Amino acid sequence: MIKSNLIPVLKSFSKKELNEFEKFLNSPFFGCKKFVLNYYKVLIKHYPEFKEEDIGKEKLFGIVYKDRKYNDALNRRIVSDLLRFAEEYMTYINFKRERFMTTRCTLNELRSRKLEKLFQLRSESMLDRIEKSPTVDPSLMLESYFVHMEMSTERSSIRNEKRHESSRRAAEDFISIFICVFYSYLRHTITFVKEIRKNSELMSGFLSNFNFDSFLKAIDSNQSIYNVYIKMIGYSYKIVYDIEDKKAVNDLWNLLNNNPGYFSKKDMLDIYVTLVTFYRYHNNKYDNIYLNEELYIYNDILKHKIYFNLQLSFCRNYIRLSALKPDPEKIREFSEEYSPDFPPEYKQDLIEYCESVYSFEKKLFERSLTAASKVNIEKELFKKDIKILKIKNYYELDYTDSVYSEIDNLKHFLTDAETINAEAMTKSRKFIKYISAIMRGKEKKSNTDLFVLKKELSKEVKTEEKNWLLTKTEELLKTVG
């Protein structure tokens, strides 16, 4: 078997890329030897599995060199050459995809060859495209910076207004890029403050001497094409810095509503993550006061496909929010429409999880239990969710012994859990406390105890399944009379 990074690289290629790569190897421009190309043609027949028995070194070598004795040094050289060419090919396709790189290199080469007319034609065309772009992001800023820097350098011998304008625009581009990178890093350090051991002294020094609020007010009075983008950076940072800053949240929403289509898919996702962080904090602290707002963001992400792939945490949160609403049909729609985008390794588990939660909300408790038993996601948060879901189902089915057994299982699970955060742990333990109290009230049929429990539950904000627990308490009170 070929023990090389070549195989993982080739597995990452699509069928279209494999064909392009063969043309790449076949081009005399890149200097690939004919025997290397022939080896590739034999090897690639076993894509995408590349089974060990099919790609043995001696076997592949024997197919390429039919009557020649196996030469390990030559085989290793061929594999090494293929890996090198594969890396060159990936560099090429990435270069073609990243427009700011091709822009800079094209203009730099035209300028160095003193092709003034073509340089002027290309640079003006590039600027026209940049300025007409409906969206703005750091890569566009960087491309604009390279264009203006090349234009300024090209006009260095002529001190005219165009040269001054190019210099000004290049400086504005660079400042905007710096703000994007700087405040993106600051947001990162705040988000992962417990994991970052050392902060940059240079950045700390700049931050302590730069007033972003004053800067945001100042840019209101000028017509920079980056005003909206820089405001987005500022408002997002303020929300992360101060999770109670409701004004920054309103400012950010107003910015979005007043500039539809301005932000790229990646930026919209980052903005929504920031807003969800704010809403989730307040929902946890103030008993779901922003449940509709948080769910709106999740639905908008799905509706406009503002995602690169659906992460496991996103799926869990969407299902949880839809159940809290409650809107079980959204859970069913989510499973049917978006399961192709579920993480492949958890796809079937998530489908069963959706079915379990949906069935519970539809009062199909046996079906919910059956689906829950098929969920095998190793993440501790999911295991905790499934255990709580089973407890609820057993309760609804009046399987008293199973309720107590599952409560005990949940207690032991939480004791041993290592990755569940403190807040989720507290809410889960409160759930155990209240469901246990409900079970005692059910057995004792004590009107007084249940009234006390209902009063305590009504004030509680840090417990799982508060609405369900309250409903079960009220049902018992009616039964007890």
Image: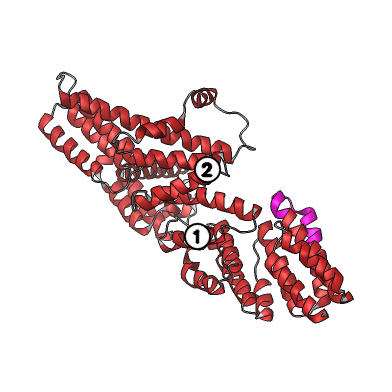
Graded by Cα atoms within 10 Å as few (under 14), some (14 to 19) or many (20 or more), the crowding at tag 2 reads many
Q: Which residue is mark 1?
A: 298
Q: CA distance from mark 1 to mark 2?
A: 19 Å
Would you say residue 266 is visible in this rendering? no
Q: Nearer the viewer, residue 50 or 225?
A: 225
The span picked out in magenta is 410-425
The image shows residue 306 at horizontal and vertical percentages of 42, 56
Apparent side of residue 220 relative to residue 474 in the rendered image (left or right)? left
Q: Nearer the viewer, residue 211 or 92?
A: 211
Badge 2 element: helix
Residue at the (31%, 47%) spot, across then down:
25
**Residue 370 location, quadrant:** bottom right
Using the image, tell me which numbered label, if any, was put on residue 156: none
Q: Is residue 420 above or below residue 346?
A: above
Apparent side of residue 397 relative to residue 86 in the rendered image (left or right)? right
First reached walking from the N terminus: tag 1 or tag 2: 2
Which amino acid lies under the numbered mark 1 shown in the image of this protein?
Answer: Tyr
* Residue, far left: 117
Q: Which residue is mark 2?
A: 239
Dominant secondary structure, magenta: helix
Apparent side of residue 78 relative to residue 473 in the rendered image (left or right)? left
**Residue 384 location, quadrant:** bottom right
Q: Nearer the viewer, residue 98 or 169?
A: 169
Nearest-to-viewer mark from 1 and 2: 2
Residue at the (78%, 62%) spot, across then down:
456
